[in-house]
Amino acid sequence: MEMTATGKSKGQWVFYRNFDDTVDYLSDQPRILAFNPFCHKIEALDRDEAYRWHFRVTDPQNNPFDVIFNIQQESEILVDIPEESSSIDPEEMSDEMIRQFTVGRKITWHPLSQDKTFAMPEKYLFEGKVAAEMLIVPMQKERTRVDFDLRVNVAFLLYPAFRIVPEKVVRTMVSTGMSLIMQTATNHMFQKISKDFGKIRRL
């Protein structure tokens, strides 16, 4: 029987670097995913800011299985235009005006649809979906706040031993376990980032 489990992870960090440096660093998806303990390969796809993540984890019986995620990354500049300038057409704003009114940047990851599936359950290969958002906001004294929110869905085959347990109970157990794994991986990733990028602090 196939079941979908959902894992969630979130947190807030302060990066002790300026806004532009922080945005540039966190926009480099292959670089930061390399610090995730479960991600063993990242490959660029044939479109801008699109990647395939290869994750490897172990099941309750300590058997390894792989999960593939196809991800599209998008970046949005957040601006706060004062009332006296609200009549300006956003398309006609100069780079200097955009920089002046910028209050943050939002980086999002969302599932990238594919024409074919890579899942092969008989070979312990599954496909997952990721939805994530990083809200990056400048602070005073050359510091930057980062809000990270991640949601992962993975469809997998249920072991025969679990089939005697009500599906709702199993789904809750598995999703809780996955959330714990994802939160641990997120914390580990940001700890590694702090050693590579510079001082960061969790709020």
Image: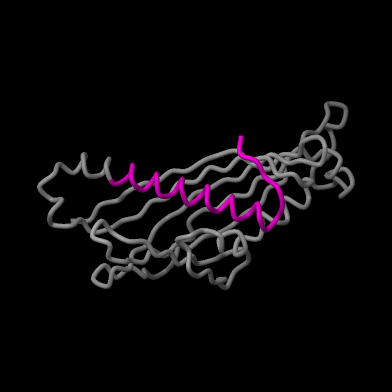
Q: Position of residue 45 (x, y in %)?
A: 55, 71
Q: Is residue 134 above or below residue 141?
A: below
- The residue that appears at 57% across and 64% down in the rendered structure is 50
Q: Position of residue 127 (x, y in %)?
A: 37, 62
Q: Is residue 107 above or below residue 29?
A: above
**What are the residue bounds of the magenta stretch?**
174-203
In which image quadrant can residue 200 be found?
Answer: top right
Which quarter shows the N terminus? bottom left
Q: Position of residue 95 (x, y in %)?
A: 86, 50
- The residue that appears at 57% across and 45% down in the rendered structure is 133
Q: Is 102 placed left or right of 68 in the picture?
A: right
Residue 185 forms part of the magenta stretch: yes
- The residue that appears at 39% across and 58% down in the rendered structure is 128
Along the viewing direction, whichever of 73 and 37 lies nearer the viewer:
37
Which quarter shows the C terminus? top right
Q: Main secondary structure of the magenta part?
A: helix
- The residue that appears at 67% across and 58% down in the rendered structure is 196
Along the viewing direction, whichever of 135 and 187 lies nearer the viewer:
187
Q: Is 11 placed left or right of 157 in the picture?
A: right
Q: Is 130 placed left or right of 14 in the picture?
A: left
Label count reads 0
In which image quadrant can residue 166 be found?
Answer: top left
In which image quadrant can residue 78 be found?
Answer: top right
